[in-house]
Image: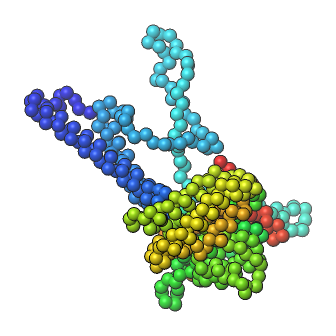
Amino acid sequence: MLDAADLPDDIAALKAMLIAAQAREVRKDDRIERLEKLVAAFKQAAFGRKSEKADPEQFDLALEDLETAIAAIHAEDEADSTSGKPSPESRSANRGSLPAHLPRVEEIIEPESLICTCGGGLHCIGEDVSERLDVIPAKFRVIVTRRPKYACRACTDGVAQAPAPARLIQAGLPTEATIAHVLVSKYADHLPLYRQAQIMSRQGVDLDRSTLADWVGRAAFELRPVFDALLADLKRSMKLFMDETRAPVLDPGSRKTKTGYFWALARDDRPWGGGAPPGVAFTYAPGRGGLYAERILQGFTGILQVDGYAGYNRLVARDRIGPNIQLAYCWAHARRKLVEITRNGSAPIAEEGVRRIGELYRIETELRGLPADARLAGRQSRVAPLIADMRTWLTHHRARVAGKSPLGEALAYIAKYWDGLCIFLGDGRIEIDNNTVERTIRPIALNRKNAFFAGHDAGAKNWATIASLIETCKLNAVDPLAYLTATLASIVNGHKQSRIHELMPWNYSGRTDP
């Protein structure tokens, strides 16, 4: 804030100061405008309708830095304001509202004096109330367990003492809540164990990374029966989703990484009001061949929604012996191939295909949430005619387009999987695409970026076990930390295998429904 005494008396110098100030404001406005355009461009690239392959996570850091820069410029603007208050034109932010379930700590700020200037006493006529979000950083504490020993003064029949409580880590330091915290930090918050050890050391808790790894391994072993029960429950469904993603694993013999795969098997009947709770189970396999999908699906019969990966053909081979599986294919993948072509220049046929598929999605959005029979009726009356017309369009253009061209290959892909793409027309329970399982598998990919690779095949299996339970918690609006704490405690205290279904995430009583 300038003081009049600081201003020069010379008119020319005053003009120079004014011009310089105006130039700073212009530069500041230009910087804000350029940064805001960059933010808009990043968001369009990450979430826009023309983006089919973009991974939103890869834009997060850039977006954070851009938005931080904009906020810093606004703060500079406010500091330069002569009033010292935020400019009325300052950027508005969507701060949301603070959840009602959070505890409130009230502070009452009274005036320095309740005596009026006339000498009378002031009385309260109202109040202004504001709320701010506060945080109490995580703190470690020590649980001291004392077990007194009692003896009889009249005889020597023995000593009475309560039995020691069961522990997951016998004679170890952590409670089950501490172990659950490590699991959630690693597999939900993507925080590797060595970083967790660094965070703990700031509070004077010096634990070696290998110690934390021992806790995780023992917890994974104890949770394995729960995972097995989850997978078995999913395979009793009549409709599932399946997808796979890379899982780099260290190969100790060659001192390099080899490529394994996480196979995701997911259920989500909420779009049509089905009664089965949503869930996902990840299974590690050393390869991507259809043989592994067949092994994972052993015992399953019904509809499997997948992408166009050729390995799934093994599941519907004529000479296959086993339960019947019907493959429903993904319109998002069909659309994706056409979108890629439109990015390389003018492509009227591809653009027309994208528009046609977009119309299918528009109707599906309107039908989402309706009962299966209502969805089926809507598809038969509104979607089926569009599909029939698209079949004519597809046949017409395939005859005109070179088969080896990118457009020819994209159209051939749609034709190859046409029957599986149209299965959703005859069953209101089936989705139009495989996006449900792709969303559940995204955290695996993010964890892979943070951890780089799993240390061993067994480590990848542990990864799959714990990630399955955490992601299923998320699908059911259950706090993973509370669930894992309670589940580990139940296991340690001898929960019966015959009642393992009680430990499914959707049966946990501490739900956090919004």
Residue 75: which quarter of the image? top left
116, 454: nearer the viewer? 454
Q: Position of residue 416 (x, y in %)?
A: 59, 75
Q: Position of residue 257 (x, y in %)?
A: 50, 83
325, 474: nearer the viewer? 325
Q: Position of residue 419 (x, y in %)?
A: 65, 71
Residue 15 in sight in this render: yes
Residue 60 in sight in this render: no
Query: In the picture shown, does residue 380 fall above or below 301?
Result: above
260, 313: nearer the viewer? 313
Instruction: Determine the residue positioned at 32% across, 30% down.
Output: 83
Q: Position of residue 93 (x, y in %)?
A: 45, 42
Instruction: Determine the residue positioned at 69% across, 62% down.
Output: 425
Query: In the picture shown, does residue 363 fall above or below 7?
Result: below
Residue 308: which quarter of the image? bottom right
Query: In the picture shown, does residue 255 fall above or below 20?
Result: below
Quadrant including the N terminus = top left
The mark tally for this picture is 0
5, 367: nearer the viewer? 367
Instruction: Determine the residue positioned at 52% across, 63% down.
Output: 353
Instruction: Determine the residue positioned at 38% across, 33% down.
Output: 88
Colouring chosen for the image of the structure? rainbow
